Amino acid sequence: ELLRSIAKNPTENVSALKMLTVKEEDELLRKFNDTAVSYPKDKTIIDLFEEQVRKAGDSIAVVFEEDELTYGELNERSNQLAHYLRNKGVKEETLVPICIERSFEMLIGILGILKAGGAYVPIDPEYPLERISYMLEDTGASIVLSSSSELEKLSRAASKNIEIININGNAELSKESVDNLPAKPQPRHLAYVIYTSGSTGKPKGAMNEHSGILNRLNWAQDYYKLTGSDTVLQKTTFCFDVSVWELIWPLLAGSKLVFAKPGGHKDPDYIRSVIERQHITLLHFVPPMLEVFLGQLGDNDCKELKKILCSGEALKASQAELCRQKLPHVELHNLYGPTEAAIDVTYWSVSIDDKKIDKVPIGKPVANTCMYILDKQSRPVPIGVAGELYIGGVQVGRGYLNRAELTAEKFVRNPFIKGGEVAETRLYKTGDIGKWLPDGNIEYLGRIDDQVKIRGYRIELGEIETILMQSGMVKHAVVVTKNRNEESKQLIGYIVVNEQFEKQALLSHLQTKLPDYMIPAIWVELENLPLTSNGKINKKALPDPDINVPLTDGYVAPRNELESGLVEIWKEILHLNQIGINDNFFEIGGHSLLVIRLVSAIKRKLKAEPTINDIFIHPTIASFTENFIEKVKNPSQQAANIKYLVSLKQGGVGIPLYIVCGEGGTSLRFKKFSELMSKDQAVYA
């Protein structure tokens, strides 16, 4: 076809010559994108939620720990908040930040903002103060929703002209009307703004409208068919767009929504217990967490679970195979989509008939969505040829808040569609690389820029590099991701330092500006960064960290058998050859998923019972052994009857140490004598 194009147009530029036949072009542009489906274009999330309230107002809508709310109660409480916000001046497209941990109040806050016509802006309470302050300033917010536990931090982050509304401590809310508001948001109104990492050193807010989100939720309901008998687990932080479908979709389908407790999403044992206790039928996993979760399962676990949806980063064939082995009764679905295009835009399901899974594509476009794979001249590439992924259709977002230049660069005119509504004639340039497979599925191949995904978090490496340079302690910096082992993708910072450099001061600088997941775990100091012949940084020439060299100053060897055992476990988990007892787990390569593996290994090898939180609180071996409660297994049967064990005397004062057995009398807990003496009482259960 290329040769024919040359013969027909011998004076044409090579870049303009066609390689596709008319038939091939039709297949790529139209057949593979034949996704048109009729959905009510005049509806919004709020319309469909209130319809569900009318159908089943007395049914349980949401469960959190031991508490629950019916659809009617959830609607009334969110209506009261919506009326209150309206009186405060919130109207169509008003941006209202909300900074609350996972709870009833979080959901009531989101629904209340939407009902008032506003768009919610989720802010993680764990974010550094400076990041929170920037987001509040960038949104131009005059109101921010919060709860009692976040008030103190927000008061330090917010300017004086921002009113902080405490949802669970505001008596005025109970005086508002419980009736639905007469004025409702329209399909083209903003629903939320979610901030993602930005290469300039500041996060950027991606704006999405009701129409795009509702299309995604309507498609999901058509495809997955939730019913009133289904229960969905909500465990994703609401600063990631997966949370949008976790929170809203069940409420539109008449299903039950169950909240994981804050922090519970990191603990596979807790997730398994919630799945079984609350009869969860559908939930979401980022692929690395899915792998960890599956590794903790027994043969008879999670029998009521029906569907697992994966997204956030590439799902490996090995992970899909493991899921099929561990949970053969569960459907596994892989989804893909950026925050800029209403959650997910493609889908693929693992077939139970396939004997072996060789690859996991990201699939085909969802309803009313188009996917294009284009070359540098924005022309379609043939099947099997790599190109950049472009997204078209109703789910394409409005752009970036206050970033007109970046919006114009990333949201471009769709050259393949003429006429139609504005949203449907625009394309979003994803920066992702993929290729068409002959069956119309898409295979994901990577990125064309420095954006990365680590454990589902979307990170612009340029943002970290910019903030490193702002510290004044670094002459040159480059941040990359490397797989230091098969299971662990990590951020590694390569720096050329100046005379003012202090590692702890640099880390403190980063911690005031970036979330923990954006701070490199490993640091390599170089005299100069390697360069290519044209003067650019040669990332391929960057050396791997030396696992034989201590990664922190002041190496201290283990002092006893317990510490030696822990050092060996840490070495195995982190793939390092030398670890000291004062090394911080999270500063030498550890992260939340490796914590889960660490806790599992300690349980298995040392016959102890730490929790994930123990590692976060005591991230060095020295502090861990000093403070951790050891559990001694299999005491004698008489232990069940022991209450008063011993009196320890210091200065004539007896301090009784009580021992209370765990389940079935199978474990005892001990505290160090030195710690007991520092307390007024020592009663442990």
Image: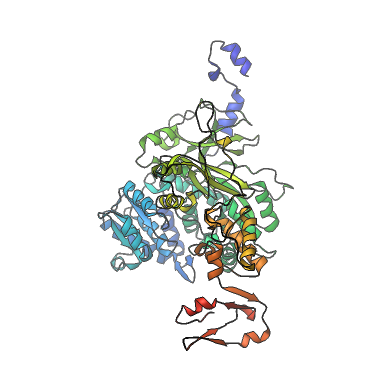
In the image, residue 46 lies at what x, y percent? 40, 54
Evaluate whether residue 198 shows in this view. Answer: no
The quarter of the picture where residue 160 lies is bottom left
Tell me the residue at 56%/87% (across/down).
646
Q: Is residue 64 visible?
A: yes
Placement of 65 over or under 540, stated as above or below: below
Q: How many marks?
A: 0
State left or right for residue 187 relative to residue 642.
left
Spot occupied by residue 59 in the image (x, y as percentages of width and height): 48, 67
Image-based side of 31 in relation to 174, left or right: right
Furthest toward the right, the residue is: 355
> Between residues 397 and 507, which one lies in front from this camera angle?
507
Query: Compared with residue 665, is residue 230 higher up or lower down, i.e. above or below?
Result: above
Point out residue 519 in the picture as x, y percentages from the top left corner: 48, 49
Q: Is residue 95 left or right of residue 40?
A: left
Quadrant where the C terminus lies? bottom right
Q: Quadrant of the N terminus?
A: top right
On the image, the x and y values in percent for residue 248 come to 46, 55
Nearer to me, 113 or 589: 589
Q: How is the image coloured?
A: rainbow
